Each structure stands twice: as C-alpha cells, then as structure tokens.
Image: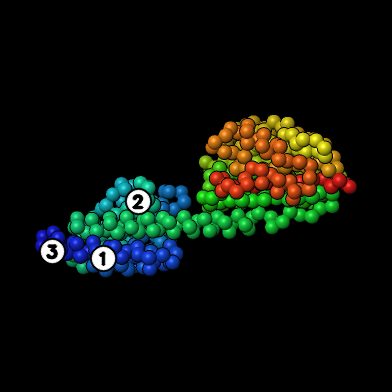
Amino acid sequence: MADGIESEDALEARLERIKAVTDTALAHLDVEDLLDELLDRVLEILDADTAAVLLTDESGRELVARAARGLEEEVRQGVRVPIGRGFAGRIAAAAGPIILDQIDATTVTNPILWQKGVRAMVGVPLLSGGNVIGVMHVGTVGDRKFAEGDVEILQLVAERIAGAVHVRILEGERDAAEALQRSLLPSAPPRLEGLEFAARYVPAERGVGGDWYDVFELDNGDVWMVTGDVAGHGLRAAVVMGRIRSALRSYALLEVTPDEVLRLTDRKVQHFEIDKMATCAVAVVSPPYDHVRIALAGHPPILAASPGQPAAFVDVTAGPPLGVGTDLPWPVTTIPLAPGDVLFFYTDGLFERREESLDEGLERLQRAVTAAAPEVVCQQVMAALIGAREPQDDIAILAVRRSADA
C-alpha cells in the first residue's frame, strides 16, 4: 500500500477473505457466538486491534454493545450509545461510514476507547432492508490510519454480517416469544362444577404475536373469561400481551365490574405501553352461573348458542380498544345463561381472510358454532374455518358451556 492506496491484488485478496465471513460453518451459532467469531475474522482481514458491534435496542433510540474484541469492557459494562451522539451514534444517525483519526472526549462519548489507547477508528452501519440495525467499528492502537479502501472492505463485511445477524435475531425473538406465550397461556382450562371449557391457541405462520385467552376464578366465586389481541407480531407483542393479561387479572381481584377492569387496564396501557393497542372481550359469571356480564374493548362480538337453536352474536355495544386514549365507556351487557348454553370467544385471526369480506368470515363462524360440548365446538370451528390452511394470523379461541345438569 502506498500513500493510503491499496493495490488491486491486495484488495482482491482481502475481498476473497470476506467470502468466508458468513460461511455455513457459522450457521449453528447464536447471535453472541456468531458476532464473536465474525469479529475475530474482521480483525484479521483489516489488520486492526479492536472491533465492536452495537445493535439498536427495542426503542430504536440507542445502540447497545453486543460483541467486542479488544474492547470487551463495552459488553461487560453494558455500554449504551444514544443514536446521533458519539462515534457509533453518529454513524447510525447518518446511516453512513465515518473515519476518525482523533480519539478523545471531543470525538467519542465512551471513555473506554481512549483509555484503551485507540488512536484511529473506522465504522459503518449495519443495514437490513434499508433500516439501521446496528453499527460495526474497528480501531487501531498504532500509527496506522484508515483509508477509503478500509471503508469499502468494512462495508462489504457489514453487509454479510447484517444479514446473518438479522436472521439470528428474528429466530431468537421467535423462540423467546413462543416460550413466553406458552408460559402465559393456561395449560388447560380449569375444572369447575357447573361450567365446561375448551380452548385453542395456534400461532401464525410468520411467528407468534399478542393473542391470548384466559379463564380464572376469584375467591368470591366469579369466573372471568377473556380473549384478547395486541396489535403487532413477534416478541414485543407477546411481551405486551403478558403485561395486559396480568393487569386484567390483577384488577379483577378488586372484585369490580368488567367495565371498571377495562378502564383500569386501559389506563395502564396508555401510561406504560405507549403506542400499543389491544382489543379484548371479557365476560364474568357468578354462581349459579345463570347470567353472564359481557364487555368488549374494540373486540369482535361473542357468539352464544342454545340447544336446538342456531348460534347468534351477542348484541353488545363495543367500547374503544385499550390504549387509544378516548373517554368513551365500555358498556356492560348482561344476558341469561341457561343449562346447555355455549359461549364462544375468539380473535380475528380465526375469520379474517384477504380473499373475502369480514361479514363472510363471521357468517361461516356463526354456522360452525353449536351448543355442543366445548371440545367439540372447538373442533368444529377449527375444521370449518382453518382446515388444512396455514394461519396468517394468531388464533385464540375459548368455548364455554354451562353444564346441562347445572
């Protein structure tokens, strides 16, 4: 290399070495191990002393150190860099590379960098689908300065790293969301004298999200039945779902009315789950279970079926979804529940289809619900509306029947 210009042969040799950066030998590694291995290769390719990868956090406002070589303190100390500030933050904000030949408090926000003796750095954004998902930077403690050829090499490496990391993150989020969802959904509906239950939860083809069902009994004998749907998919929606489910349970313990439980839960969502929205249906029965109180928060109506009669949608005026920030109430409707009657709760993934109207899907659902045993109802509904097709959205359903001898 002369005057900072790399020969074509040397550049070609380094480009060839990049081809091994995300080879199949790395396919079995998780995100952290993958990044560690890739950084070792980057140091070798660029003849650098330090390397680090910072990934955007859930808020998209900060970068979090996830892997480092020569700067392991960044990861161990949980370094976070606001986007737009410091070396890595400026790279993320500009979505472009930066070369830095002066490392001190005036150019970087992380004191670890100058304390380690780093004298020059080059960094590039990690891009996936046009979005910045992180930053990778390398540094040297010697006299070497980085040039445009190094930027070109690092950008090529970053392209390969970003794709591999993005896939690993999505896989990790899906696995975490599935584990979270399994832990939150009841393993089996409760056994209560006078009531029978059956339920299903089926995740979408593209991964789990924020749908749930719940059944629980309070000390006063009230039985609460809930289905809900948090807008969105993936780990974030599953986490919010868990929080809303817990909030509903907690407020129900106050032994207040369904509309008051929804009001309190809505307040919690608006305060702590900013920009998130959820719909839900809640119903409460008290011994001897001859009446049910129902309230809807932007959720599709519950179906009711009596022996020998076709199912019908319960006429309930829906209140607003949780989290939208209105002053509208959640009206409560009370209907009789005779022995043998069935209530059917569901989320919209059950009936929504791109190729048909919502009314058509709801009509098919209405025909599928009968006053049969809850397990039979669930079987009938899933066969009629899902069959062998791959669900495009999460599905949660809950069937409840007042025992015929109650």
Look at discs 2 and 1 and give the one toward the viewer.
1
Q: Which residue in the structure is indicated by mark 3?
A: 1
Screen quadrant of the N terminus: bottom left
Q: Is mark 2 on a helix, strand or loop?
A: strand
Residues at marks 3 and 2 touching, judged by CB atoms closer than 8 Å: no
Query: Mark 3 and mark 2: span between their CA atoms?
Result: 29 Å
Q: Which residue in the structure is indicated by mark 2?
A: 127
Q: 84 or 157: nearer the eye?
A: 157
Question: Tag on residue 292?
Answer: none
* Residue displayed at 43% across by 66% down: 29
Residue sitting at the far right = 405
Question: Tag on residue 17?
Answer: 1
Look at discs 3 and 1 and give the one toward the viewer.
1
The tag earlier along the polypeptide, 3 or 1, is 3
Q: Does residue 119 lie above or below 340 as drawn?
A: below
Quarter-wise, where is residue 149 in the image?
A: bottom left
Q: What element carries label 3?
A: loop
The tag earlier along the polypeptide, 3 or 2, is 3
Q: Does residue 243 lie above or below 359 as drawn?
A: below
